[in-house]
Amino acid sequence: MLLLYIFGLILSGTYGVDYEDNDLAKVCRPIDRQLDLLFVLDGSGSVSGSTFSTQMQMLNRIVEMVDIGTEKTQIAVMQYSSYTRVEFGFSTHQTKDNLKNALGKIRHLSGTTKTGKALDKALHLFKHDTSSGARRDQEDVAQVAVVVTDGHSHDDPVPAAQRLRQAGVQILTLGIGAHINMGELFDITGDESLAFQNLTSQNSLDQFVNQFKKIAVGELCKFARGAHGAEIICNSDSIDIRVSTVNPFYGHLYVANQFTHSECVAKAENLSTEVYLPLSLTSCNIQKQSMIAKICHLITHLFYYSNHSIRMPCSYKISSRNSDQCRIEDTRVGETVIHSWECDKSVFDTYQSMLIHSCIIINVISGENKTLVDENGCSIDPAVMDSPEYVEPLTAFAVGKSVKFPDSSLIQYQCHLRFCDRLLGECDAILVTICF
């Protein structure tokens, strides 16, 4: 049998088409998802007495919804006011009875409400504290923080919440007390459907349970064709490649580095979800050798990037949503990535802000480029890079997808930074743009 190497066999979408809504066809089935679940409890003076007791009753209701164990759901609890106290970590209690006993021993702290400070502590617990018992970098484990508060924080919780969500932690908020500031709860989650009021009513409890089940149930998916998404059939003098997509596909299926040779390219037509590429063994620079009892292999290519080596007052990094590494060296096409910019505060004035604008992606081999963010700082192609969000005046991030150009896995991102002084009113004309 012949072993044929098809190096860099990939799909290419055409510009102007919403290719983000398409993907290789998969067959999926629901599976129970393991959770690292952190309760972040408001222990301030405004949440005391019967209100704090109600808060603990709500927690016990949630505990009854899940199975507790090392390979199931692990629960940790933090309580905060002026400072934050970790009541117990994720791996401390591995049975439901022990967990409920521990919840019954929690006593109210009292003090002011520092929700932002508590959310930064939550990030440390999930991603950096080696003794917390959090299961990091496990695809089958979802990390979830349930923030229980009245929504009247004495610090700004939004930047800390953004950092927590950016690190891959799902946040739900539960409003507690007679005077709930739902606006703050919405801001913390970034999604109104994840913010809830008191679970004392059956309707509110049902809404929470339905949303919680969506998080707790995952999917196990396999490609409909082949282990890597393509069905490859080896014949005596040719090779047949078939790919199925979820939606009608616009673009090309081709052999890497052979895009200019028509016999090496299949163009998707007629709104089809099936793409077929027949290849002769004498074409497209196919390499072959005789081997016994082997099958054809599809090699998935990665794209690479390299950082600046020069010391600059502003830094850029690209990271994975599900990783706590400071940056990634490579990623697969289509995976979610986070672009981050940060300028050294010691170099700039206290009142200075920045605007990320005019971002392009460059084909390192050919020099071809495509604009991703316009001169006003708004995304032109959100599927590749969304509009930058500003955590602080000199810190920003943008969510995107890893992509590549045809016949080139080497790409470079380039953005411009514009600075202004808020005290002098320079930022009024620069930072007023609202991106849609």
Image (spheres, grey):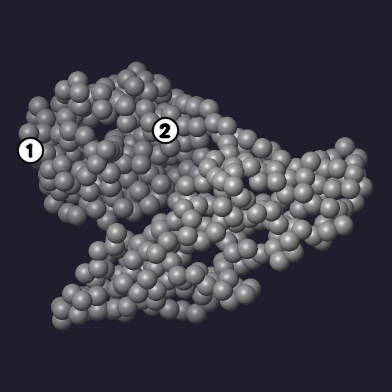
Binning the other alpha carbons within 10 Å of mark 2 as few (below 14), some (14 to 19) or many (20 upward) gives many
Q: Is residue 278 left or right of residue 176?
A: right
Q: Which mark is residue 312?
A: none
Q: Which residue lies most toward the front here?
A: 270
- Residue at image mark 2: 35
Q: Is residue 394 left or right of residue 8?
A: left
- Residue at image mark 1: 179
Q: Tag 1, which secondary structure?
A: loop
- The amino acid at mark 2 is Leu
Q: Whole-percent x and y of residue 386?
A: 39, 59
The quadrant in which the N terminus is found is top right
Q: Which residue lies at the image location 40% right of the left edge and 35% below the top edge?
A: 36
Q: Is residue 219 left or right of residue 434?
A: right
**N-terminal label among 2 and 1:** 2
Q: Whole-percent x and y of residue 271?
A: 56, 46
Q: Quadrant of residue 423?
A: bottom left
Nearer-the-camera pick, 58 or 74 = 58
Does residue 411 lie above or below 164 as drawn? Answer: below
Nearer-the-camera pick, 94 or 259 = 259
- The amino acid at mark 1 is His
